[in-house]
Amino acid sequence: MGVGLKLGKGGGDVGGEKAKMGFEETELRLGLPGNIRAGEGEVARKRGFSETVDLKLNLSSKESSGVDPNEKEKNLLPCATDPAKPPAKAQVVGWPPVRSFRKNMFATQKSSSEESEKGGAGNAAFVKVSMDGAPYLRKVDLRMYKTYLELSDALAKMFSSFTIGNCGSQGVKDFMNESKLMDLLNGSDYVPTYEDKDGDWMLVGDVPWDMFVESCKRLRIMKGTEAIGLAPRAMEKCKNRS
Amino acid sequence: MQKKMAYSFPDEVLEHVFSFIQSDKDRNAVSMVCKSWYEIERWCRRKIFIGNCYAVSPRIMIRRFPEIRSVELKGKPHFADFNLVPEGWGGYILPWIVEMAGAYPWLEEIRLKRMVVTDESLELIAKSFKNFKVLVLSFCEGFSTDGLAAIAASCKNLKELDLRESEVDDLSGHWLSHFPETYTSLVSLNISCLGSDEVSFSALERLVGRCPNLRTLQLNRAVPLDKIATILRRAPQLVEFGTGTYAAELRPDVFSNLAGAFSSCKELRSLSGFWDVVPAYLPAIYSVCSRISSLNLSYATIQSHDLIKLVCHCPSLQRLLVLDYIEDSGLEALASSCKDLQELRVFPSDPFGAEPNVSLTEQGLVAVSLGCPKLQSVLYFCHQMTNSALVNIAQNRPNLTRFRLCIIAPRKPDYVTLEPLDVGFGAIVQHCKDLRRLSLSGLLTDRVFEYIGTYAKKLEMLSVAFAGDSDLGLHHVLSGCESLRKLEIRDCSFGDKALLANAAKLETMRSLWMSSCSVSFGACKLLGQKMPRLNVEVIDERGPPDSRPESCPVEKLYIYRSVAGPRFDMPPFVWTMDDEDSALRLS
């Protein structure tokens, strides 16, 4: 079946190569009110994709607690380098465009419904994240991440002007090690804490990831020194659970 | 002699004539005819719709329209629904309520969408408007059941309370008891968004029982199935009903009670709710299905065969919201049974799953487009699409007015030919000449925008994600879409040039949203300086934009026309690009 769409624009050949942009290559001409057609007959140039600014994602804020002046040229937006390569589904904020209300409602339903085939991966668990000293809240969907490290990275990106204490590449294990925990809490770094289903504030990382996702109601990133009071409770709860 | 008649036409007569003109567009046109018509019209306008609460200030509204009875306002940009607008962005209703409390003591109706509503605002509404009748809060947040209690207690003439998918802090189920025993005027109550905390069921029962005009009742999930019969027997006149959880242990007495209760509702035309559905209880509604015109099963996790049985009982169906559990086979059944279908929305049951979990493909949508001649509005989430399917759909259904397709994986090509879906969407805009709303997805080049700019002359709202190659794409849309009012773009490599070249266009639109694109801070500043009637707002959580080079792209950009000037309630991560550089607020 032929799918021939003609774009006849009154005499012009409207192939992609000859489409007119109507502005100078070298000069930005503002399309101000009253200027209905920003000029015709100019040499048109279709900007190839490769000519767009190559943007690099600054993945780790942990390395750059102070902004290196040389780094200022690097842009902080996702670089869509290759149209055929979609970003990993789990990492894209707000995609697919399903309202969080629907996602959360559905998540609770799926876990309680007898018909659900699998728990975990498909559902959503939105929690509010606040950071001491930051003027704004965010919401994260905990189901977008598989490990504490992923969550920690995401939080670092969100609140990138602050440094967040490393959850540790071993994830949970760091919090099982008392002395390492004490080191962390004595530093000036920020630690993530969360309010669990019982209403208690706990240190993030004290329980296995899946259990954390199920019980976390709210996240708060606070200064390590302030979180010291949570350590004993974290240890205790750990012991009770294991 | 003829001329004299025109001048001596009394104002009261004109006012009476104008009272028959309800549509905003017509009212606006009337007001532009001449100065005296402008004056007469402004005094008799009773209803106002403000699509962007920052486009105008309450004072300006009050100054022009002193006798308003009904206000509708929208706040946050649409992409706030998908977490792209950080908390604290704005959209506060309180300043409006404060002004209106003084100026419109006879205000009857407030309808809000995506606004931040506090308990304080609700209390002020309850206190200030003696004849308050209608409160609709769609996708709003910031209030609790305490605020609702204030409304319930004070608004003696309240007819409608609709909390459509708002986020409510559920502090106590007892707010319903604040409706006095003497209160009987309820017509419409939608509390489906309230959390799983109990709403006092006995208070609900009594309320329903004493309000003979109740037409719409949408319960929340906490209301169990075995209570439905009680409610329905007290309100057999209901036209719209939303169940709570539709699950219970299967018991014949409960079933027959339920079925009997439904069958006594002769006016019932719309059903929703259906959380946690136990399929065995679905036949309880069969007796009303033949008259049902609207069915919202978007929370019902039931499989295709149960859905097919249900839709086959609903020949009068005009509107269906459903999960993709319906699958292609279910949509084919829908296409043969429901010839009056006008609107279809298919939501994903597993939006983040790596693989499709159901057999729902482009075929389902093609079948519906073929079988349902009145289909106008489509929202469809799926995992795969082809150009040929889109062309089919376009040719089958040139009467489409809203077409929103979401292929779940970004940038996915035609899965058969591996080509971009430009031609498919091009066919949609070419054939569907009355298309007003379009959402794109899949692999798309600048070509699709060329088609859109050429053909989509009635298009008012366009949503774009992960598409296009260059500024040419954006230029096609801005220069070609004559009716464009709202444009929202995310993750596209559109930059400065098209935006600046089409700056004038932005004043003819309500708003433009661009996030994760390539618009530089410098361009935003330029736009802000040159276009005083636009508010150019940069949203950037990395810190002040002037701490980075001017060529650095901004995270998010929201541009809207306004007669109110820049707003003053911006959070620290929003900067407005002003006329004067000095007005650029630093954090």
Image (cartoon, rainbow, N blue to C red):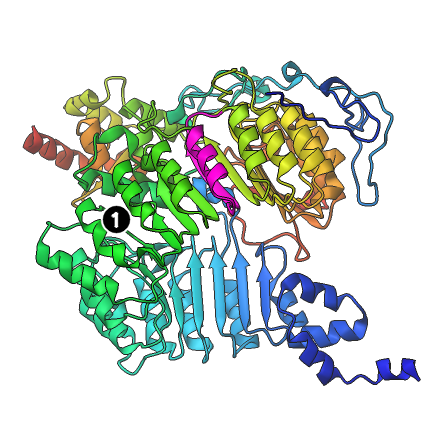
* Vertical side of A175 occupied by B178: above or below: below
Residue B536, image x and y in percent? 64, 43
Callout count: 1
Residue B28 visible in the current orientation = yes
- In the image shown, does A38 or A134 lie closer to the viewer? A38
User: Which residue sits at x=57%, y=24%?
Assistant: B444
Q: Which residues are magenta?
A: B362-385
- Describe residue B456's horizontal placement relative to residue B417 as left or right: right
Q: Is residue A238 magenta?
A: no
Q: Chain of mark 1?
A: B
Q: Quadrant of residue B179?
A: bottom left
User: Which residue sits at x=23%, y=24%?
Assistant: A183
- Per the image, the residue denoted by label 1 is B275
Residue B367, image x and y in percent? 45, 34
- In the image shown, does B281 or B516 lie closer to the viewer? B281
* Vertical side of B8 occupied by A176: above or below: above
Residue B495, image x and y in percent? 65, 28
The C terminus of chain B sits in image quarter:
top right
Residue lying at the far right of the rendered structure: B1
- Describe residue A167's horizontal placement relative to residue B87 as left or right: left
Q: Quadrant of residue B475?
A: top right
- In the image shown, does B469 or B96 lie closer to the viewer? B469
- In the image shown, does B89 or A188 lie closer to the viewer? B89
Q: Is residue B382 magenta?
A: yes
Give the residue type at disc 1. Trp
The N terminus of chain B sits in image quarter:
bottom right
Residue B82, image x and y in percent? 44, 40
- Describe residue B275's horizontal placement relative to residue B530 as left or right: left
Residue A189 visible in the current orientation = no
Callout 1 secondary element: loop
Q: Quadrant of residue B254?
A: bottom left
